[in-house]
Amino acid sequence: MNKINSIRKDWSLIETLIAQDGKILDIGCGDGGLMEQLENNRNAITHGIELNRDLAANAIARGFNVVHGNAELDLSQYSNNSFDYVILSQTLQAMMKPKDILSELLRIGSKAIVSFPNFGHWKIRLQLLISGKMPVTESLPYTWYDTPNIHFFTIKDFLNLCNEMNIVIEKSIGLTSKGKQFDISESVTGVNFFTHEAIFLLSYKNFEPIKIKSSKKVFAKNSVIANLLLDES
């Protein structure tokens, strides 16, 4: 799957994760291609932030609500829950502090959509094993000395980070190098080996109290553990 087809597939899957009429922030929005797609197909209200000045200028010239800025420095300017969705497509591995970025995505957005290439894919492992050099693949096309990617990680690494941060994975989609789509949560065996790219829909755990009546007291229990309680009445 070449880079252009990969991007188009990535955008198509991102679109399926977004409800109609949502307010969206696209981080690293380029010239506004994904924003245009979501406005047309999801009636979305889109905003973008782009590090490249020329791309940001092109997006603005095309009529999109885009600012030129650095997400790692400028996301702090957005208030909590400013957006329904915050999108970070194929960029997390280029961030200086990926953990902090994930936290910011879910502070300013109700949900985050994150996609990235999987450094645990078998082609990358094989290249590293045989050549002993940093791999160059379709999804990671740069040599080690000129790559914008500074944090290489695998599906397992990302799942562990989400668990550490108490992030809920609402949906997870994997793509093979041939573009075959599958649900990561239902493909545990070998998922880190065969997944070429991954897309995750994320949110924070929402602990809503549920009142449970008993003959003595009324207790407010967290909804995630309420099904473990016995009825005392």
Image (cartoon, rainbow, N blue to C red):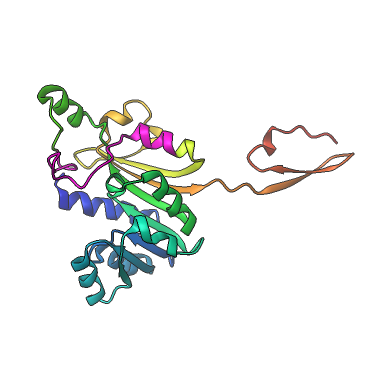
Q: In the drawing, does residue 166 fall left or right of residue 93?
A: right
Q: In the drawing, does residue 46 fall left or right of residue 90?
A: right
Residue 158 covered by magenta stretch: yes
In the displayed structure, would residue 186 be above or below residue 76?
A: above
Q: Position of residue 112 (x, y in %)?
A: 42, 52
Q: Main secondary structure of the magenta part?
A: loop
Q: Residue at x 44, y 47 (%)?
A: 202
In the displayed structure, would residue 217 be above or below residue 10?
A: above
* Identity of the residue furthest to the top in this view: 130
Magenta residues span 137-161
Q: Position of residue 40 (x, y in %)?
A: 31, 69
Quarter of the image with the C terminus is top right
Compare residues 7 and 107 and report the one nearer the observer. Answer: 107
Q: Position of residue 66 (x, y in %)?
A: 31, 70
Residue 189 covered by magenta stretch: no
Q: In the drawing, does residue 103 fall left or right of residue 216?
A: left
Which image quadrant is residue 131 in? top left
Q: Position of residue 197 (x, y in %)?
A: 27, 41
Q: Residue at x 28, y 61 (%)?
A: 29
Residue 107 shows up from this direction: yes
Q: Residue at x 89, y 39 (%)?
A: 215
